[in-house]
């Protein structure tokens, strides 16, 4: 089951006006929600690929985030990378905030392998996307959600 947390958004931010960009909605499925970011699985079975999207209305550039929020988002990216490392054991995790086609700030985290479809090149724009089979997509999303839930509990100050 895909998890959504009831954790509040960081102080000084509001997700009431936040909406996911239609392209991100079309290209991915929900995994979970962290305190600031929505986590989504890109629908491309060639790569273990997630995106973290800060739930802050109108945010397009990393530099537009207040520094304290940016630090929290970076902590969430760090958590997500640890989970990808634990689940998939890649040789590298690529992460980037490109935003040339979709201006809503989103952070890509992609587990990479020397035998993947794009290695050693970047995954963006490489080849033709191969959508997951429905059960495989759900299985992968649930594994990542469970890993984030466990990892978050382990690193919680409570």
Image: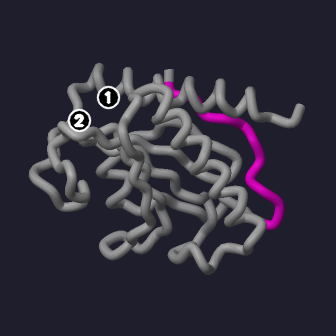
Q: Which residue is mark 1?
A: 137
Question: Where's residue 41, x and y in %?
Answer: 39, 41
Per the rendered image, the range of residues in magenta is: 2-12
Q: Which residue is mark 2?
A: 45
Residue 81 belongs to the span the image colors magenta: no
Please identify the dominant SS of the magenta region: loop
Residue found at x 39% / y 70%:
98
- The answer to which quarter of the image holds residue 65 is bottom right
Q: Quadrant of the C terminus?
A: top right
Residue found at x 80% / y 34%:
156
Question: Where's residue 67, x and y in %?
Answer: 74, 72
Direction from residue 135 to residue 24 in the image, left or right: right
Residue found at x 67% / y 51%:
75
The answer to the question of whether label 2 and label 1 lie on touching residues, with beta carbons closer than 8 A, is: yes
Name the foreground residue: 99 vs 117: 117
Name the foreground residue: 88 vs 104: 88
């Amino acid at each position: 089951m895909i998890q959504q947390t009831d954790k509040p958004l960081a102080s000084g931010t509001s997700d009431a006006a936040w909406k996911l960009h239609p392209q991100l909605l079309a290209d991915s499925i929900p995994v979970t929600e962290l305190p600031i970011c929505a986590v989504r699985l890109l629908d491309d079975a060639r790569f273990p690929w997630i995106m973290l999207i800060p739930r802050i209305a109108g945010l397009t550039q990393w530099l537009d985030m207040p520094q304290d929020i940016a630090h929290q988002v970076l902590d969430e990216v760090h958590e997500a990378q640890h989970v990808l490392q634990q689940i998939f054991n890649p040789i590298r995790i690529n992460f980037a905030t490109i935003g040339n086609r979709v201006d809503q700030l989103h952070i890509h985290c992609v587990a990479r392998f020397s035998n993947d479809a794009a290695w050693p090149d970047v995954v963006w724009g490489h080849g033709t996307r191969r959508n997951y089979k429905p059960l495989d997509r759900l299985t992968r999303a649930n594994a990542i959600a469970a890993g984030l839930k466990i990892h978050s509990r382990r690193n919680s100050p409570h």
